[in-house]
Image (cartoon, rainbow, N blue to C red):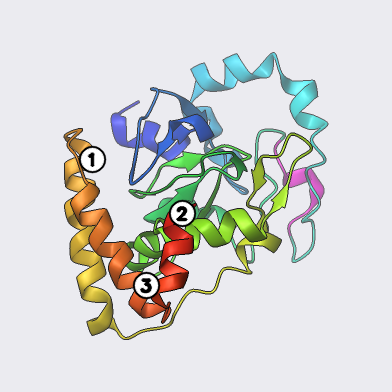
């Protein structure tokens, strides 16, 4: 079995604790991903199949095989396959560059990860055509303050950035040209973060741009910075 064949099944995975502000630290963890309809090729991976057979009963009891319509019968659904709808293949979103974030915590962090990297619950991710612009906005003091003020909370007081809370975040729609200054600064920040260097100067620049983008007054900026 060559490396390319293995990459079809084995994917690097991040946990919430691995996601940092504008970066991430992969802990060397992998996940085995068997997509719907892949059972015909499983004989190419005897070692993986043998290893997971010991968990066969648990895997069979995951509530799979729901998508039996459209000519795909339950008997054709292998117990290893994920129950992703063959009509939309949501797993393809994992193969894209994406913004990942911890969905629960006192200190939330957002970062961009390259395609093919998975995240485990309760972490979440989003894909778009303007990841760097969105990352800059989400990481700004303005939006961080908004998230802490408007998100649901756990019993322990941690922020729960679930879909309902995330959809409340007002992200300004601006042109591609207007996004470019944000993109350049985010590129600088990510490059410096990878070298473990200070990024405060560039992050402060993004904050100043976001204040203007949201039309905040001097008093409102003081409130944000006071937090």
Of the numbered discs 3 and 2, the one sitting upstream in the chain is 3
Horizontal and vertical percent position of residue 196: 20, 33
Q: Quadrant of residue 39?
A: top right
Horizontal and vertical percent position of residue 222: 42, 63
Q: Nearer the viewer, residue 47 or 220?
A: 220
Q: Is residue 77 magenta?
A: yes
Reading the image, the residue beneath label 2 is: 226
Q: Is residue 208 above or below residue 175?
A: above
Q: Nearer the viewer, residue 115 or 88?
A: 115
Q: CA distance from mark 2 to mark 1?
A: 25 Å
Q: CA distance from mark 3 to mark 2?
A: 14 Å
Q: Nearer the viewer, residue 199 or 94?
A: 199
Reading the image, the residue beneath label 1 is: 193
Q: Quadrant of residue 132?
A: bottom left
Reading the image, the residue beneath label 3 is: 211
Locate the N terminus by quadrant. top left
The residue sitting at 62% across, 48% down in the picture is 36
Q: CA distance from mark 1 to mark 3?
A: 23 Å
Horizontal and vertical percent position of residue 191: 17, 46
The residue sitting at 71% across, 18% down in the picture is 55
The residue sitting at 79% across, 56% down in the picture is 68
Instruction: Specify start and end residues of the magenta stretch as a single range.
Output: 72-78
């Amino acid at each position: 079995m060559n490396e390319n064949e293995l990459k079809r099944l084995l994917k690097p995975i991040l946990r919430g604790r691995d996601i940092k502000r504008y970066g991430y630290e992969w802990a060397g963890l992998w996940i085995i991903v068997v997509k719907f309809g892949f059972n015909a090729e499983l004989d190419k991976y005897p070692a993986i199949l043998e290893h997971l057979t010991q968990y066969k009963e648990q895997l069979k009891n995951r509530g799979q095989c729901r998508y039996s319509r459209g000519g795909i019968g339950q008997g054709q659904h292998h117990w290893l396959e994920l129950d992703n709808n063959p009509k939309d293949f949501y797993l393809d979103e994992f193969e894209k560059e994406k913004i990942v974030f911890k969905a629960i915590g006192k200190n939330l962090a957002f970062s961009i990860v390259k395609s093919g990297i998975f995240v485990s619950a309760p972490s979440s991710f989003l894909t778009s055509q303007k990841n760097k612009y969105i990352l800059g906005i989400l990481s700004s003091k303005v939006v961080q303050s908004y998230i802490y003020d408007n998100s649901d909370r756990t019993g322990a007081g941690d922020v729960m950035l679930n879909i309902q809370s995330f959809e409340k975040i007002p992200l300004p729609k601006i042109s591609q040209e207007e996004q470019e200054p944000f993109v350049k600064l985010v590129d600088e920040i990510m490059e410096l973060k990878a070298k473990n260097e200070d990024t405060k100067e560039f992050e402060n620049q993004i904050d100043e741009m976001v204040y203007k983008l949201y039309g905040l007054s001097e008093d409102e900026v003081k409130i944000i910075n006071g937090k």
